[in-house]
Image (cartoon, helix red, strand yellow):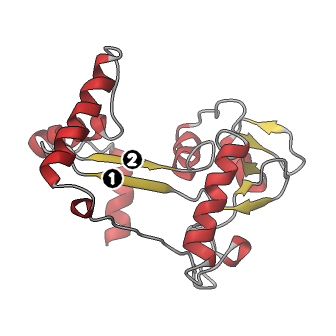
Amino acid sequence: NSFPKVVAHGGLKPVLGTNPFAFGAPRRNGDHLLFDMATSALAGSTVREHMDKGKPLPEGLAVDAEGNPITDPAKVSAGALLPFGGAKGFGLSLLVELLAGVITGAGIGDGVASMYNDFSRNGDNGHFLMALDISRWMPMEDYFTRFEGLVAMLKASGENVLLPGEVRWDHWRDAAVNGVEVDAEKFAALNDRGS
């Protein structure tokens, strides 16, 4: 869980974090299925990127303190992000808060400090991890065969179908060969922090 910057569905005050939800599943070829998303309409890092570039946010993702839609990323800190998908996204965010905050004993709601702006106290954010042993249900080779059958079915449904993480695997392979491009401003900022 993370510090509050997302309103409850129908609410005005930020009460939940962007509360990321992620899962992964092994594939035979090594390009494992990897999925990671914020349960807010967009990730906090996206707000920061838009602010750095002076770009407005798309409409319908953030509100001011009175609940009015805003597109200025600089105003989000005084307002809030909306949960993605309305009530459904709010439900997933609440699930993350229960798993990562309530049952772990970590902070919940405003009991979680901002890791960007509040250094006066411990962040107290929580994490919940669960691993399943697939071989308890079936032999791994059967699992891989079934999973690759599912992937083939998905890919056959349209020429532009991409699995979660598929683009990132391509970027990772490219970066392993060609390196990672960092613009001069970010490079200077990293050097300043590192010295």
The spot of residue 61 in percent (x, y) is 69, 38
Q: Nearer the viewer, residue 36 or 60?
A: 36
Above or below, 34 relative to 71? below
Q: Residue furthest left?
A: 177
Residue 106 sits in quarter: bottom right
The answer to which of 123 and 40 lies nearer the viewer is: 40
Q: Residue 86's spot in the image, x, y percent?
A: 72, 41
Q: Position of residue 60 (x, y in %)?
A: 72, 33
State the image coordinates of residue 171 (x, y, percent, origin top left).
Answer: 24, 38
Mark 1 and mark 2 in contact? Answer it, CB < 8 Å. yes
Residue tagged by mark 2? 35
Q: Residues within 10 Å of mark 2 (few under 14, many from 20)?
A: some
User: In the image, which disc is placed on residue 8?
Assistant: none
Q: Amino acid at mark 1?
A: Gly
Q: Is residue 160 left or right of residue 179?
A: right
Is disc 1 placed on a helix, strand or loop? strand
Q: Residue at x 39, y 47 (%)?
A: 35
Where residue 110 sits, quadrant-wise, is bottom right
124 with respect to 36 (left or right): right
Q: Rounded to the nearest whole Å, what is the CA distance between mark 1 and mark 2?
A: 6 Å
The amino acid type found where label 2 is placed reads: Phe
Q: Residue at x 63, y 56 (%)?
A: 93
Image label count: 2
* Image vertical order of residue 1 relative to residue 7, above or below: below
| Residue annotated with mark 1 | 24
- For the point 39% across and 58% down, the residue is 189
The N terminus: image quadrant: bottom right
User: From what the image shows, is residue 48 above or below residue 16?
Assistant: above
Residue that extends furthest to the right in the rendered view of this protein: 66
Element at label 2: strand
